[in-house]
Amino acid sequence: MGKAERMTNISPQEFVQFLKEQRITRFFFVHDKKNDRLICSHTQLQPMADFIGTDRRDFMQHEGLFFQVCEPHDTLQGAFVHRTLRGQASGGVRFWHYDTVEDYLRDGLRLSKAMTQKIALAGMWWGGGKGVIAKNPQIDTNDPAVRAKIYEDYGSFLTSLRGCYVVAEDVGTNVTDMASIYSKSRFTTCIPLSLGGSGNPSVLTARGVICGMEAGIEFIGGGTLEGKTVAVQGMGNVGGPLIRFLFDKKVKKVIASDIDPICIDRVKGQLPDKDLETHIVERGDNSILGVECDILSPCATGAILNPDTIPGMKAKIICGGANNQLEEDERDGRLLQDQGIVYVPDFLTNRMGIVNCANEQYGYVNNDPFIERHLTTDWEQSIHQTTLKVLRTAQETGETPAGIAVRIADELSMELHPIFGHRGRQIIESLVADRWHESRP
Ligand code: NAD
């Protein structure tokens, strides 16, 4: 086994032990644009930097990757800064279990690039980034004191990064955790309403999904949502309000599933007189994807659009809130296209989560125009208009909607922030010059 494999094939906990033995508490990999190489804070980690920097699947010239070990809970914490041309990197921090360091790194690389694309396509002046904290299976992460320490330490880490990455909430992290981060860093969004934050964005996300559906129906010349049948997988924070909005739009029927009977009862209780057919399913049961309907809306987990599920689908349009719905972008996008199913890319329709929180430090106004314009039909970068543009271009070129959306997003992500230019990159250069890796108190 080579040196790089010895570092990436092991678990995050084994890697933390290695770092402790080497007395490394913070380290970074920064992209040297001139030589297209990742430079590293510590020579003993250079094989790992080379492993990432030569990876053609997930490494996309990320500007900087920063890491620290949270003591006393031996937790690996990272900030993946993908691209900051449009502004500081923004994206949620994920708290998740990883079997290997490679899985951990790939998740951060992939998710941070996806944030660049989502944010650029939304026309926002932010860059893309992601935080990833690897769960240490030896500690009780449900213990509030343990969690507070992990997230406070993450806050100190963010502060040390001087704003090249601004954090938001993501899978495994909740608003209490965000408040812990906020106690140590002002580079934080998605903090609770009581602390001046924007709170839960899910209702707005559901409204965004409705906009994508309406654009999809317009694209196929199918009129409006009135009288349609919609199937919804997942009746949680996004799926629940989505079903209410669908009935407001006078759909004929909603068929919905969830693994949690409490979620089902809650939504049914709010809509006693509506034609809402519900199914309690087992985890991993995707039978709802094959029901007869006009629109299918995945609002639960990712990777559910794949060669196992697509052949049985009867919907004309797929448009939902779940992240990463296509198991493999090109392959599954093509399968849907060949079957005549219109796919509205997920990162286009579920943008409202980040739209809601990204600008919260600018304060609030009623019906905030900077948020509401995403939900209109006349703003050029609204969900409606962008969906139509993507679907029409896909039709003209024969490419998949996801491919077109990524292409447009990548172009937009190269635009420079109109005031601050490429300041994120300058911050990273300052961190390197000031030997950030030795800054751990
Ligand atoms: P949530 O956990 O509140 O809801 C998801 C629901 O799906 C849960 O009720 C869960 O029981 C159910 N579920 C899980 N597996 C299922 C299955 N096989 N069949 C049916 N139901 C199943 O999460 P959420 O906030 O509603 O987010 C849903 C999706 O949207 C996630 O992929 C999330 O990453 C994405 N998303 C959410 C937001 C937001 O603002 N909340 C923003 C962007 C993207």
Image: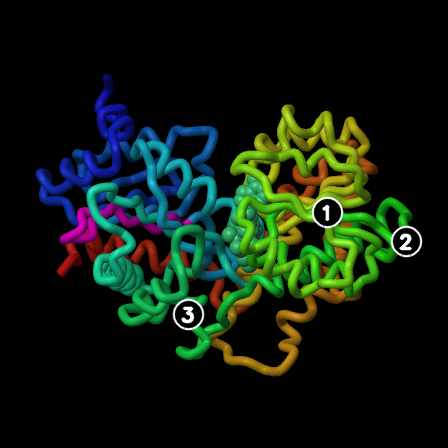
Q: Residues within 10 Å of mark 1 (few under 14, many from 20)?
A: many
Q: Which mark is residue 255?
A: 1
Left or right, 433 with reference to 331: left
Residue 386 spot, x, y in % from top left: 73, 53
Q: Which residue is mark 2?
A: 223
Q: Residues within 10 Å of mark 2 (few under 14, many from 20)?
A: some
SS at mark 1? strand
Residue 259 spot, x, y in % from top left: 55, 44
Q: Residues within 10 Å of mark 3 (few under 14, many from 20)?
A: many
Colouring chosen for the image of the structure = rainbow
Q: Nearer the viewer, residue 265 or 46?
A: 265
- Dot in front, 1 or 3: 1
- Dot in front, 2 or 1: 1
Up/down of 128 relative to 207, above or below = above
Q: Nearer the viewer, residue 283 or 216?
A: 283
Quadrant (top left, top right, bottom left, bottom right) of the N terminus: top left
